[in-house]
Amino acid sequence: MQKSSDCCPEFDSKKFDGKTHEFKDKLFLKDKVASIFHFPLNFPGVMKRVGEKIEKANAMTKPEDYFYLTDESKLFGTPLYVEVAKEVPDAEMEKMTGTFLSKVFEGPYSKMGKFAKAMTEFVKSKGKTLEKLYFYYPYCPGCAKKYGKNYVVILAKVG
């Protein structure tokens, strides 16, 4: 989990766009990013701290499976969930179970409201009930520049 512009592998949107995912006790390390009105204040520092804990515990997932989720439902403070391969000592852990629909969006973060609304409509079009939205940002700002794309993946837990 480096901070250079070479830190994010190229994102394959086919893995998430319009897909259904079944989580059964999918294990995540849970942390929190300080934020104001969804603007993260300490994201790189939190990711570094989390990455060090995960590496020390040898709990990294395979690079092609690695992802994290944020819960953007609060204006101040954003829960962060980083997928791990096993329990990490001295860290808050959370297991997620359920059905999740995912869709990939591309564009600036200023369109997040539009993306969330489109995701809500996508869930309805599938005849499902939206329980919660989670967000995954495959690229850091440097890698978004490098690849020329700013992806946002929205996962909707559905009932």
Image: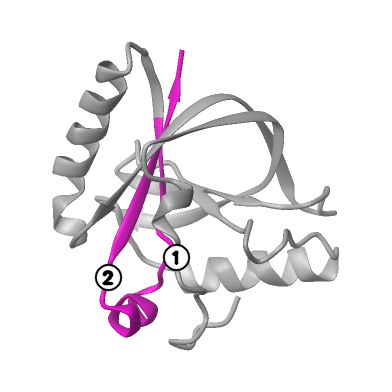
Magenta region: which residues?
A: 133-159
Q: Position of residue 64 (x, y in %)?
A: 62, 62
- In the rendered structure, the answer to whether residue 139 lies left or right of residue 63 reads left
Circle nearer the N terminus (2, 1):
1
Task: Describe the element under mark 2 as helix, strand or loop.
Answer: loop
Q: In which quarter of the image is residue 21?
A: top right
Q: Report which residue position mark 2 lands on.
A: 149
Left or right: 5 as drawn, with respect to 49:
left
Whether residue 79 appears in this view of the structure is no
Q: Which residue is under mark 1?
A: 11
Residue 79's x, y, as percent? 49, 45
In the image, which disc is placed on residue 87? Answer: none
Q: In this view, does 93 lie to the left or right of 147?
A: right
Q: How many marks?
A: 2
Residue in the picture at 56% in, 67% down:
47
Q: Nearer the viewer, residue 32 or 26?
A: 26
Pointer 2 and pointer 1: residues touching (CB < 8 Å)? yes
**Residue 66 quadrant:** bottom right
